[in-house]
Image (cartoon, rainbow, N blue to C red):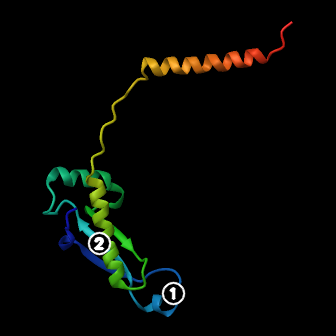
Amino acid sequence: MRDFSRELQFKTSRSSGAGGQNVNKVETSVTVLWNVSGSLFFNDAQKALISDKLKNRINAEGMLFLTVSESRTQLMNKNKAIEKIIELVDKALVIPKKRWATKPSKGQKQKRLDTKKKLSDKKENRRFKF
């Protein structure tokens, strides 16, 4: 986990929702912005991977943004925003393992056929025969 928090920019705004007078006068909502292409912490391949996986959160200027307004204080929202954006970038950098297609073994196929045969015989024995 790389801490690139020095490259982050912050904007504050008034939070929405209930909260009384505090909501109307205090800017507690924090939006964190990060320029993906201008980062010094990641190489070009990592930047491309981040841009590809988080393209829905990146605006036209190439800024990754995230807004947090969970807490009632600006400082707590700022700390949560830093944690969340670092977590987002870390998840974007994970390359999933490739899945290899497998086929059922002969034993598995035979077991399935044997089970079907037993069930068929059991149902056949329940029938009334003349």
* Disc number for residue 82: 2
- Foreground: 55 or 45? 45
Quarter holding residue 90: bottom left
Please say whether residue 94 is visible from this viewpoint.
yes
Identify the residue shown where x is 43% and y is 85%. 72
| Relative to 74, residue 85 above or below | above
**Residue 59 visible in the picture:** no
* Residue position marked by numbered label 1 in the rendering: 19
Q: Where residue 83 appears, x then y in whole percent?
A: 30, 70
What is the x, y in percent for residue 70?
43, 77
For the residue labelled by badge 1, is the local secondary structure a helix, a strand or a loop?
loop
Nearer to me, 90 or 43: 90
Secondary structure found at label 2 = helix
Q: Residue furthest right?
A: 130
Q: CA distance from mark 2 to mark 1?
A: 24 Å
Classify residue 96 as left or right of residue 5: right
When asked about the image quadrant of residue 91, the answer is: bottom left
Q: Residue at x 76, y 15 (%)?
A: 125
Camera-side mark, 2 or 1: 2
Give the residue drawn at x 41%, y 83%: 14
How far from the left and from the top, in percent, is residue 96? 30, 44
